Image: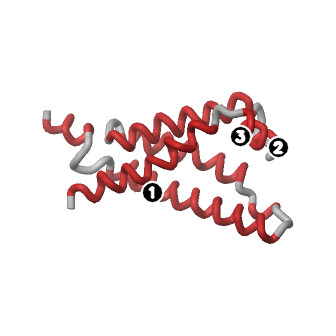
Amino acid sequence: MKYTVLVGRILFALIFLFASIGHFSAGEIGYAASQGVPIASFLVPFSGILALIGGLSILLGYKTKTGAWLIVIFLVPVTFMLHKFWAVTDPMMQQIQMAMFMKNIALVGGALILAYFGAGPISIDAKAKIS
């Protein structure tokens, strides 16, 4: 059972690691700007750095609680600024944005659990407590 938390951490972190790469592209910066994100040319890459550092922290189990808080700090504004399903008039797009919004809310929940409980037994954090 001790591997369960490790596998969960890896799976949880992957979305942030893969997503962080796009935060440095003109396309994602442009999309965020079109959705009203102020100073998108700074905030989008900055959010990519938060996602990357938080994701790596969780993946490796190193300072996991801090990494989880970085993910929360990343997700909350992204969720409310980019997935405003309540403002979308097209029914198909409204459903897509609502699904993205709810996915992010669930990810915030997972990050809060990691922020409270930490990385689990197979992690750098756990080894550091033993040493």
Which residue of the protein is positioned furthest toward the bottom in this rendering? Answer: 91
Amino acid, disc 1: Gly
SS at badge 3: helix
Q: Residue at x 36, y 51 (%)?
A: 9
Q: Residue at x 81, y 43 (%)?
A: 36
Amino acid, disc 3: Glu
Question: Mark 3 and 1 residues: CB-CB less than 8 Å, in contact?
Answer: no
Question: Mark 3 and 2 residues: CB-CB less than 8 Å, in contact?
Answer: no
Label 1 environment density (alpha carbons within 10 Å; few <14, some 14–19, many ≥20): some
Label 2 environment density (alpha carbons within 10 Å; few <14, some 14–19, many ≥20): few
Residue 34, label in figure: 2
Label 3 environment density (alpha carbons within 10 Å; few <14, some 14–19, many ≥20): some
Q: Alpha-carbon distance for marks 3 and 2?
A: 10 Å
Question: Mark 1 and 2 residues: CB-CB less than 8 Å, in contact?
Answer: no
Question: Image check: 87 left or right of 120?
Answer: right
In this rendering, the label closer to the viewer, 3 or 2: 3
* Quadrant in which the C terminus is drawn: top left
* Residue topped by disc 1: 110
* Quadrant in which the N terminus is drawn: bottom left
Q: Earlier in the sequence, mark 1 or mark 2?
A: 2
- Residue 33 in the image, given as x and y percentages of width and height: 79, 39
Q: How is the image coloured?
A: secondary structure
SS at badge 1: helix
- Residue 62 in the image, given as x and y percentages of width and height: 32, 37
Amino acid, disc 2: Ser
Q: Alpha-carbon distance for marks 3 and 1?
A: 25 Å
* Residue topped by disc 3: 28
Q: Quadrant of residue 32?
A: top right
SS at badge 2: helix
Compared with residue 84, is residue 68 higher up or lower down, i.e. above or below?
Answer: above
Question: Image check: 123 left or right of 44?
Answer: left
